Amino acid sequence: MALTNRYKSAPGAGTLAALILVLVFGSPWYADWARNNTDPDSASGWFLRLLAWPAWRFDSSDSIQEIFAADLKAILVVVLTFVFLYLLPGFQLARARGTLSQFFAGWAAYVFAGAFAALLTALIRTNPSLLGAFQAAGDGAAYGLFTGWIIGIATLGGYRGRR
């Protein structure tokens, strides 16, 4: 089993989990289902809609600039997850694999990845503003805060690798 292999890389496992989250829950099919079949005023409906935050799409009535920004945001969430997992010191400071520092470093990496991906892509949307970029970064950080525990669990037990 790949996720329980003692030779797994923590950044690789976390990035794979982020890729699966974005591909499955960011898909147009899931986003449409969540929008049409959940109650935004309930906790479960809010969470199911939040899972669709880095939504990617390939056809829409939006401008090509908006579609490109949405797709780039989904890609950047995955790429920045790897970057932050590699750079965060939680893995370097942990003496043993599977410690809580790995869990929290994985979780934090996803919070940062969501916030920075939203911030960067807000600047290429139609009519960008600084306030819009800050609000988008807040949405991305909220997404990472409530879903990043999945990345934290995926990174548990992985080796950090050599520098």
Image: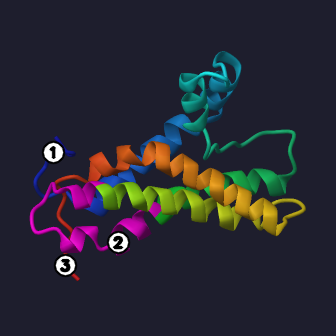
Quadrant of the rendered image containing residue 133:
bottom right
Q: Which mark identifies residue 88?
A: 2
- Mark in the foreground, 2 or 1: 2
Q: Upstream in the sequence, badge 3 or badge 2?
A: 2
What colour scheme has been applied to the protein in the rendered image?
rainbow
Magenta region: which residues? 81-103
Binning the other alpha carbons within 10 Å of mark 2 as few (below 14), some (14 to 19) or many (20 upward) gives some
**Residue 90 inside the magenta-drawn segment:** yes
Task: Name the side, left or right, on which 63 lies relative to 44.
Answer: right
> Rounded to the nearest whole Å, what is the CA distance between mark 3 and mark 1?
20 Å
Q: Position of residue 47 (x, y in %)?
A: 55, 31
Kind of residue at disc 1: Thr
Q: Position of residue 10 (x, y in %)?
A: 25, 60
Q: What SS does tag 2 mark?
A: loop
What residue sits right under mark 3 in the picture? Answer: 162
Using the image, determine if residue 62 lies above or below residue 133. Answer: above
Which of the pair 155/41 is nearer the observer?
41
Binning the other alpha carbons within 10 Å of mark 3 as few (below 14), some (14 to 19) or many (20 upward) gives few
Q: Does any portion of residue 63 appear in the rendered image? A: yes
Using the image, determine if residue 71 lies above or below residue 93. Answer: above
What residue sits right under mark 1 in the picture? Answer: 4
Q: What SS does tag 3 mark?
A: loop
What residue appears at the point 60 percent right and 29 percent down from the top-left corner? Answer: 46
Kind of residue at disc 2: Leu
Which part of the image, by quadrant, shows the C terminus? bottom left
